[in-house]
Image (cartoon, rainbow, N blue to C red):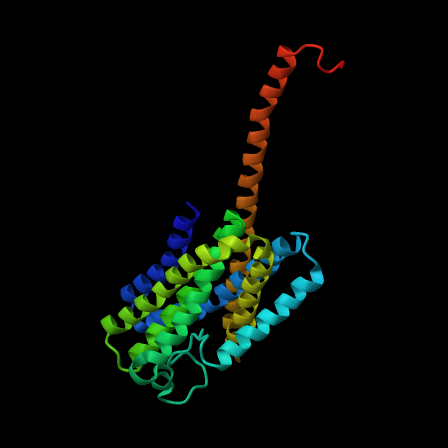
Amino acid sequence: MTLIFIVAATFLGGLISVLLAAALSAPLLGLIVRHLVSLSTGVLLGTALLHVLPEAFGSGEPPQALFLTLLGGLLFFFLLEKAELYRHGHHHEHDHHDHHHGFDAEQAGRGGWSVLVGDSIHNFCDGVLIAAAFLADPNLGIVTALAIIAHEIPQEVGDYIVLINAGFSRMRALAYNAVSGLAAVVGGVLGYFLIGPWQEYLPYMMVVAASSFVYVAVADLIPQLQKRLSGRDTVMQIVWMGAGLLLIGGIVSILHGAHEHEHAGHAHDVAPHADLASEVHPGHEER
């Protein structure tokens, strides 16, 4: 059942982004991406700092070791991006970023392979992180998957716009995005089988997942938001970022409430059996 959840979660992010890109025009997509970048900033930071890291640090593992893992994760994703193997940009022409003319063609590279390879590796890593989260706790897996999906939508839509502006047809750009999205499914399935025997290391894997979220938010998303904007646009950024934080907070509260209700129901079911045992064996308490 866990594997089904992992496959569904990894497949959903790519499917939603491809369908969204196919349904809307490029100018409208550009407007949506601007707001989704703010939203995913709040979602990623909220998931990492308010849910994933507290869960990992509540596992009883040494805090020093977990902090060292967090530092190592940040450095790992930095080096992976330096090697151009962890691409997560949302840039596109006419997005009010200071890029020179033809920037998208350079981003796409020859035949679009730089976009495809970089995003595929990124999506593969995301799939492994989703698998680790579901193996640690289903509720944690749901929140982690939602955070990654929230980030994947503007990423894939932004890459679609890059490819369109670089001269690709809509169908070819969508096909590239679809292939890239399937890498998350592959990462999720492999993660499920490879991580399973190493359950005791799941808190450290959760910290690595959190380091990925924090790195993407701080290294990519927030710098895009730090542009000279009008007061209205700045307020909209804050509103969308706050919406991302509230979304994660609400989902975590709902999941925790359902989890506590399930445990309470289980305790209620056990209690009558305890009373029955007391009746069948009268005087048991006096012994």
Please, is residue 231 above or below residue 65 in the view? below
Quadrant (top left, top right, bottom left, bottom right) of the C terminus: top right
Residue located farthest toward the front when viewing the structure as drawn:
197
- 52 and 31: which is toward the camera: 52
Residue 246 vs 272, above or below: the answer is: below
Q: Nearer the viewer, residue 59 or 220?
A: 59
Q: Is residue 133 visible?
A: no
> Residue 31: horizontal and vertical position, in percent?
39, 71
Residue at 58% from the left image edge and 57% from the top image edge: 201
Question: Is residue 158 in sight in this rendering?
Answer: yes
The residue nearer to you, when weighing 212 against 27, is 212
Q: Position of residue 206 (x, y in %)?
A: 57, 59
Q: Position of residue 263 (x, y in %)?
A: 57, 35
Left or right: 39 as drawn, with respect to 204: left
Counting from the top left corner in percent of width and height, residue 136 is at 54, 51
Marks counted in the figure total 0
Query: Is 174 on the left or on the right of 208, as rendered?
Result: left
Q: Residue at x 76, y 13 (%)?
A: 286
Q: Quadrant of residue 64?
A: bottom right
Choose top left, top right, bottom left or bottom right for residue 108: bottom left
The picture quadrant where one finds residue 192 is: bottom left
In the rendered view of the protein, which quadrant contains the N terminus? top left
Residue ranking furthest to the right: 286
Residue displayed at 33% across by 73% down? 160
Residue drawn at 44 percent across, 55 percent down: 193
